[in-house]
Amino acid sequence: MKNIKIYMMLLLFASITISACKKEKSAELTSNLEETVLDRKGWTVTASSQEGTNLAAAVLDGYTNTFWSSNATATFPHWLLIDMKSQTVITKIGLTTKQGDPKGFTKFRLEGSNDGTNFTSFGEFTFVPATFTEQSFTLSPARNVRYIRLTALDKAATQTGTVTFLSEFTVTGLQERKPLTDVALGKTGWTATASSEVNFPGEETNLAAHVVDVISAKSPTAETVPSFWQADYDVLHPYPHWIIVDMKKASLLSYVGLNAHTDAKQGFTKFSISGSTDGTTFTQLGDDRNFNPTTTNEQKFAVSPAAPIRYVKITLLEGSAYPCLANFEAYVKL
C-alpha cells in the first residue's frame, strides 16, 4: 500500500509539472508582440543646449549627415531628452555620432520616465566616437517608459573643448505584431510567353503579354473589352495550353489571381499552377484547380511554394476550343 501511495504521488507531481510546461509554452506561442525599430514620427527632443543650426531635432530626422551639437560654451554633462509621446517597452538604443569627427562623448547615462520629471537610471555605457556606424546598447531588463534621457558624461581624450554632438538616436522596442495582408505585386517589367497565341495584326492581336497589362488595359483589336491572351485554335494547338509569367524577381507567393475573358464561351474550366526559379524546372503548386469562365471578377487561388519563385506557369487543362485569360496577378503576404 505504501508503494502504491508513493507511485500515485509521483504521478500527480509529473502531471502538475507537465501542465506547467504546457502553460508556459502556450503563453509564448500566443504572444502578439514583436521587437522592432520604432517609428519616430511625431516624437520630439529637447537638449541642455544647442549650437546654431545643429539642433536637437537632427537626432530624429533619419539623416546621418545632420547632427545635434551642444553650445560651444556649455560644459559637461550635456543631455538630450526624447519624448516618444506614449509609453513603450524599449529594449535597445541606437546611437550614431557626427560623421568624420572622432571627438564627442565617450561615456553616457540612460534614464527613463513616464512623466518627464521623475527618472530611473538604466545604467552607464561606453560610446566610441571614432566609430561612425550605429552603436547599439541593450537594456536589460526592457523598460516601459515614455521619456528617455541621454546624458553625455565624459569627452573624448582628443578633444580640447567641451562641446559634444550626436547624429542619430534610434529606439528598438516591443510593438503589436501587424497582421499579415495579401498584397498584389507591381507588374512593371513583367513578361509572359505561351504555348501559342493569336497574333494577326489588324484583325486579332491577343498576346500572352496582355495578361501582365494593368487591369484597365483594353484589347488593341477589340477596344470594348479588356486585353487578353488567347491560345491558338485547338485544331493546330490542342490542350493543354500554357502561359508562363516571368516576374523578374523571386517572391514567396501566397495567391495567384486570374480574370476570365468577358465572353464565357472563350473560357477554360480546369487548370494547374506551377512555379520555378529558373524558368526551366517547374513544380506544381497544389492539385488541379477549377475555374469559372462565367464571371469576370478576379478569382484567387492559394499557393504555398516551398521557397520564393520567379516564374509562374498556368497550364489550361480543359475548356473551350480557343480559351482566353484576361489578367494575371501575384500576391505576397506583407
Image (spheres, rainbow, N blue to C red):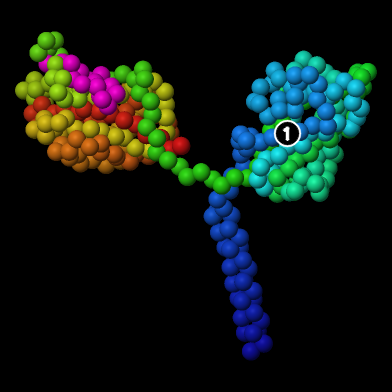
Counting the numbered discs, the total is: 1
Quick one: 6 or 251, which is closer to the camera?
251
Left or right relative to 84: residue 156: right
Residue at 39% across, 38% down: 182
Residue that carries the numbered disc 1 in the rendered image: 45
Quick one: 138 or 322, which is closer to the camera?
138
Label 1 neighbour load within 10 Å: few <14, some 14-19, many 20+: some
Residue 241 drawn at (x, y percent): 18, 27
Q: Secondary structure at mark 1?
A: strand
Which region is colored magenta?
A: 204-220
- Give the quarter of the figure containing the N terminus: bottom right
Left or right relative to 278: residue 328: left
Residue at 75% across, 48% down: 115
Q: Residue 251 appears in which quarter of the rendering? A: top left
Task: Give the amino acid type for the residue marked by disc 1 in the picture.
Answer: Val
> Can residue 22 be seen in the rendering of this structure?
yes
Q: Residue furthest top?
A: 201
Residue at 83% across, 28% down: 49
Residue 196 drawn at (x, y percent): 17, 19
Judge whether 258 appears above or below 161 on screen.
below
Magenta segment: does it hold 282? no
> Can residue 270 be seen in the rendering of this structure?
no
